[in-house]
Amino acid sequence: MWIRYSLDWLLSFIATTLRMGAGGTGRPHSIANLPLTLYEFEGCPFCRIAREQVSASGVTVHVKPCPKGGKRFRPEVKDKGGKAQFPYLIDPNASDGEGATEMYESGDIAAYVRREYGSGRPMIHGLGPLNLISSQFATLSRYASGILKTPAKSNEKPLRFFGAERSPSARLVKETLCSMELDYLWTSQALDGQTLPRLEDENSDTAVTGGRAILNYLRKTYRSEE
């Protein structure tokens, strides 16, 4: 198990390198009263671009994973937006006072998050076609992990996850959360000096720190043989 985790971590580090370290931690210049909702799946090159800006901005989002074959959250996207396309963002804190802002398209989502909540644009996002090509290679380096649904029990309450998009360990955790269709509140920055990545599960009153320990917890708690 340790050897498998080490290999996965190395491949995840390669993905981070291919993305030039995009998706660090930041503090939003505007605090969202309510979490944004992001429908996405980990192995999607377009979703990666949106996540990197969310991570850099430090805004909290409620991630509703939509792996291929998933039936928990995927139908919601089509019902709300009219098509099963990802990523899909909903911001209930609309600045114009006319209700929630909803949108598809990774570039539009990244620009919106940057404008409304801050921080700078990841360098690779300004490199035109190379941005998407690099994201596609990052997906290949992780042998498309986080694309397909795996059998798992549902969580009644959202989990809470702290970890930056560019963190190799955090990526491994988010891939598993996605495949299991476990929704979670995600913040890239640590609170009160906590060690990252960190998972908090209100369903079992459990907190776990460290990528390998979190993965073990998720498999033990939510894996299903169905």
Image: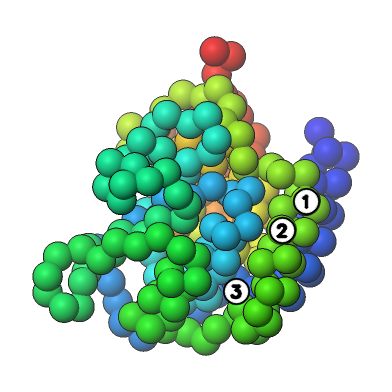
- Helix, strand or loop for disc 1: helix
Q: Estimate the x, y position of residue 152 in percent, counting from the top left.
A: 52, 25
Residue 180 seen in this snapshot? no
Residue 186's quadrant in the figure? bottom left
Which sits earlier in the primary sequence, circle 2 or circle 3?
A: 3
> Is 168 displayed left or right of 188 in the figure?
right
Q: Amino acid at mark 3?
A: Gly
Q: Estimate the x, y position of residue 194 in percent, counting from the top left.
A: 53, 64
Q: Are marks 3 and 1 in contact (CB under 8 Å)?
A: no
Q: Which residue is mark 1?
A: 140
* Residue appearing at x 55%, y 84% in the figure: 121
Nearest-to-viewer mark from 2 and 3: 2
Residue 89 seen in this snapshot? yes
Q: Amino acid at mark 1?
A: Leu
- Residue 196 versus residue 41: which sits nearer the camera? 41
Mark 3 to mark 1 CA distance (whole Å): 21 Å
> Is 154 displayed left or right of 215 in the figure?
left
* Residue appearing at x 38%, y 83% in the figure: 115
Q: Which residue is mark 2?
A: 136
Q: Which residue is mark 3?
A: 24
Q: Are marks 2 and 1 in contact (CB under 8 Å)?
A: yes
